[in-house]
Amino acid sequence: MTIQQRLRQLAEKQGLADMGFFRTDHPGSGGLGYGITLVARLSDAVVDEITDRPTHSYFHHYRTVNAYLDRCMLETGLLLQQQGWRYIPVGASQSIPTAEDPHGFHGRFPHKQGACLAALGVMGTNGLFLHRQYGPRVRLGTVFTDCPLVGENPQPLENRVCEKCGRCVSACPANAIKGVVYQRGMPEISLIDPQACSQYMKQAFQKIGRGAVCGICMKVCPYTGEKAVP
């Protein structure tokens, strides 16, 4: 059994929705050179309760799924380590303030970038990753490793799902979504205004997780289930 087969077997045992592999020279990889994307599916029933604001149940679910992903990444890394490889897990929800980004809108590595490199889906106009089967209703984690995962990066998928929709643009109460269709290599700030999004959440949803979550653009996105990315 190959190491990738063992990793997928572990992912299935953990209950993850998907797993993908990619090569990378991103500085956040610590020079390890390879990445593994872990995908956890959110509860449709919880997401469907979101209206013009998030719910307390969604805030709790968001935090719980992030903690679950962190555990899955640790177990994935421990398996790699047992086989003699190095690993670095990247927090499922992590903000790192820097001189260039004092608000901490970015972390060590954008999980969405890894998921796209692994051809698990595409970036949406809403700035969310759209999984090929589950649309935006997922959370992501990344594990970097020096284990030489077999093969080159698969061909990234093309985003043709957001060209004529615009539901997220109309629904965003912060007017943070710019309505731009993502093109490969485009920075995320071309799609959304993270400061407008963050400020609105902190002001409007302070009593729901102190304004840490929203989820409206995810709720209204139609590309889930049978309508997911082709």
Image (cartoon, helix red, strand yellow):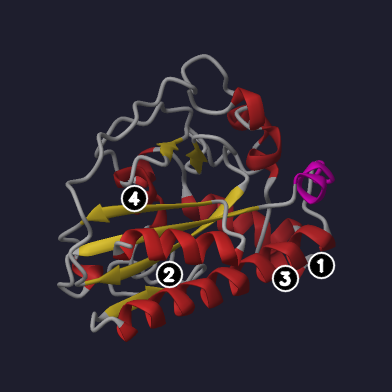
Total numbered labels? 4
User: Dot 3 corresponds to which residue?
Assistant: 210
Return the x and y of residue 109 as percentages of the image width and height: 33, 64
- Find the distance from the CA under tag 4 to the CA under tag 2: 18 Å
Seen from the viewer's position, the closer of residues 121 and 202 is 121
Assign a secondary structure to mark 3. helix
Say which amino acid is labelled 4.
Gln
Q: What residue is drawn where x is 22% and y is 63%?
A: 34
Residues marked 3 and 4 touching at CB (< 8 Å): no
Q: Which mark is residue 104?
A: 2
Q: Which mark is residue 207?
A: 1
Return the x and y of residue 212 as percentages of the image width and height: 65, 65
Q: What range is drawn magenta here? A: 44-51
Please say if 230 is above or below 214: above
Return the x and y of residue 60 as percentages of the image width and height: 76, 67
| Residue 49 falls inside the magenta stretch | yes
Say which amino acid is labelled 3.
Arg
Q: What residue is drawn where x is 18% and y is 72%?
A: 32
Q: What residue is drawn where x is 31% and y is 84%?
A: 81
Q: What residue is drawn where x is 49% and y is 55%?
A: 195
Seen from the viewer's position, the closer of residues 27 and 1 is 1
First of labels 3, 2 by sequence position: 2
Say which amino acid is labelled 2.
Gly
User: Dot 4 corresponds to which residue?
Assistant: 113
Q: Let me know if residue 4 appears in the view.
A: yes
Q: Residue furthest front?
A: 1
